[in-house]
Structure formats: C-alpha cells, structure tokens
Amino acid sequence: MAEDRPLKSAYELAMERLRRSDREAGVEERPLTDAQKAAIAEIRTFYEAKLAEQQVLHDSKMRKTFDPIEREKLLDEYRRDRERLESERERKIQAVRAARE
C-alpha cells in the first residue's frame, strides 16, 4: 500500500468530480451566510406547511367523491398545485442563494 489514506465512498468521489467540473467551468463556490440559511429555512418551512395544507384539502375532497372521472380531475389538480408550490419554493431558494450580501 503506497498511501495510507482511507478509501473514499462513491458519494465522496462523485462530489470531488462535481467540484472539479465546477472549477473548470468557472463556477465559484461560495458558502451561504447565516442570513441566507435562515431565509432558506423560512422558505422551506412555509412551503412545507402549504404542501401539507394542500394534502389535507385534497384528501378531504377525495373522501367526498366516488366518481372515478371526478377523482381523476381532483388528482390532476392536486398534482398541478403541488408542482406549482414546489417550483415556487425552489425558485425562491435559488434567488436567496444567488443574492450577494
């Protein structure tokens, strides 16, 4: 054994490759500030609550409906609302990450 370094996991190797490709592409690595971390946590908490609210409302509507066509419409509506909320959440988090302080 030429080197006494411990073996790296597949995750660690993948992260090293990603960091190397980011450096080569000119992407700068910048740690989040405490204010950014707090803002991201607040965004995540808000959207977790909104998603939970949507789940409860969806479940309530599904319990009241037995028509398969109506249930499929409710399910499609629920999926769209969920995707919209998740997209909003990610967009807001990216805006916080991109903000320079």
Image (cartoon, grey):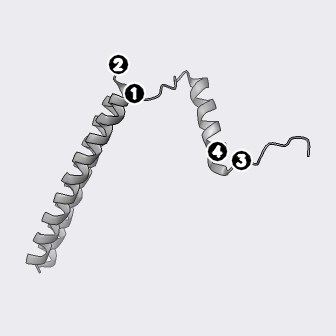
Q: Quadrant of the C terminus?
A: top left
Name of the residue lying farthest toward the right? 1
Residue 88 lies, with reference to residue 63, above or below; the image says: above
Kindly state the secondary structure of the residue where label 4 is placed: helix
Looking at the image, is mark 2 or mark 1 earlier in the sequence?
1
Residue 63 lies in quadrant: bottom left
Q: Is residue 29 left or right of residue 97?
A: right
Name the amino acid type tagged 1.
Answer: Thr
In the picture, measured across the screen, residue 44 lies left or right of residue 17, that is: left
Vertical arrangement, residue 36 with respect to residue 83, above or below: above
Residue type at tag 2: Glu
Mark 3, mark 1: which one is toward the viewer? 1
How far apart, in angstroms, are the residues tagged by discs 4 and 3?
A: 6 Å
Callouts 2 and 1 close, C-beta under 8 Å? yes
Find out whether the residues at labels 4 and 2 contact each other: C-beta distance under 8 Å: no
Q: Quadrant of residue 82?
A: bottom left
Mark number, residue 12: 4
The CA distance from mark 4 to mark 1 is 24 Å
Q: Is residue 1 left or right of residue 95?
A: right
Which residue lies under the disc numbered 2? 101
* Residue farthest left in this picture: 64
Inspect the image, locate mark 4, and give the three-letter code of the amino acid beneath it: Glu
- The disc, 3 or 2, on the residue closer to the chain's N-terminal end is 3
Residue matched to label 1:
33
Mark 4 residue crowding within 10 angstroms, few (<14) / some (14–19) / many (20+): few
> Residue 17's image quarter?
top right
> Which circle's residue, 4 or 1, is located before the other in the chain?
4
* Residue 8, label in figure: 3
Residue 12 place in picture, x, y as percent: 64, 45
Q: Which label sits on residue 9? A: none
